[in-house]
Image (spheres, helix red, strand yellow):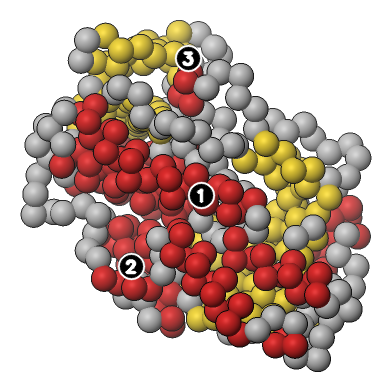
Amino acid sequence: MQVTIVGGGISGLSLALSLHQVGIACRVYEAVPSLAPLGHGINLQPNAIRELNALGLGEALASAGILTAELAFYNKHGQLIWTEPRGRKAGYRWPQISISRGKLHEILLGAIHERLGAQAVVTGHRLTGFEERGSKVIARFSDPLGKPAGEAAADLLIGADGIHSAVRRHFYPGEKAVFDGYLHYRGIVEAEPYLTGASMVVVGHRYHRAIMYPIMRRPGGKVMINWLAYTRIPPGSPPLEAWDTAADKQACVDQYQGWTYPWLDVRGLFAATEQVLQLPNVDRDPIPRWSFGRVTLIGDAAHPMQPVGAQAGSQAVVDGRVLAASLMAARDPVEALALYQDQRIAAMNDMIVRNRNLGLESILQTAEERAPNGFQHIHDVLSREELESTALNFKKAAGFDIETVNSRESFVDLTARAVN
């Protein structure tokens, strides 16, 4: 069997490693001329680390990132709403790892070059169309100048090409991104560690909040902190298609006047950041199908969601593992893609909606509505039962509650081999 993977991001590269692990040949086609380590931070939950560990990448990821020890929520006044241990500190068998997206990409790409060979990833190839011919899927590509760059024939085609997926657009033409009227500012900056030194912190409420977490240790005890600030989109912002454009840093800093707390100077952190990016807060509506014959979608191409609860990257990894396992379980490739879809689509469509409603971060908004001027004690505002049930329900819905992750083995049974 031969598989064409469209997209060389986290979902595409991790899928390629999973397919190789179970004996299925594949090749990744990426639109950009060269793959360089880019991007800011990402949180990989224990359900994803469990699978990446099964791919032999656990130690490399742990040494490159930071093992997240705590998740903490504060209101806009800097008062603690909720804190919980994360990863191994919470009792998982695997850690939660906060890491640079560029470093994660570098580790995945390095493993592919080592195991599959440099020819396994083809750059400068943008998908322009595809069609099924008998038992094959023929994909057509163009080069960076828009000139034809040839075709690739395979038994299956997997769309791992992100929120602007060309594969998805083939099946859902005219679909629009869903924009909620808010903007993300994003940055990464070297600073002193705060709280535990491995804390992921969310401050504010639904309409004005910030997320921060360290992703790398630096010499002299400092850390690289990744941050994301969410606020109403100001006049003159870029169109929805213009992702990761340079922002007016001062405009961002001015939005967070007064966000200076004993445990972290949030506004000062933003002001110290050399380059601030901006992007609109968009996702896409859930769709009823991912798999169409010999073609399917994974990662953001299948379920683009708002950046809530640190889910998108982790779920992309899990997608690839479930897809690889489905190809081992079903003799008919078309049946395998349907099996993969049926195992994942309901939960991921649910996550899209949950993230629009803030997921676990909904407790921030509840605290804001009940106590906009702050509180003496959080349990006067939100009971322990409310806080605990909100946290557990989100984890169960996302498939990374402690019991689920610890009680199962990897999605890929390495005692079996692909039947195709």
Is 415 left, or right, of 43 in this rendering?
A: left
Secondary element under disc 3, as helix, strand or loop, is strand
Secondary element under disc 1, as helix, strand or loop, is helix
Type of amino acid at the residue the image marks with label 2 = Val
What is the quadrant of the C terminus in the image? top left
Q: CA distance from mark 1 to mark 3?
A: 31 Å
Q: Is residue 220 visible?
A: no
| Label number found at residue 33 | none
Q: In front: 23, or 320?
A: 320
Is 56 left, or right, of 393 in this rendering?
A: left
Looking at the rendered image, the disc whose residue lies closer to the viewer, 1 or 3, is 1
Residue position marked by numbered label 3 in the rendering: 128
* Sequence-earlier tag: 2 or 3: 3
Q: Quadrant of residue 234?
A: top right
Secondary element under disc 2, as helix, strand or loop, is helix
Residue position marked by numbered label 2 in the rendering: 405
Is 100 left, or right, of 378 in this rendering?
A: left
Type of amino acid at the residue the image marks with label 3 = Thr
Type of amino acid at the residue the image marks with label 1 = Asp
Mark 2 touches mark 3? (CB < 8 Å): no
Looking at the rendered image, the disc whose residue lies closer to the viewer, 2 or 1, is 1
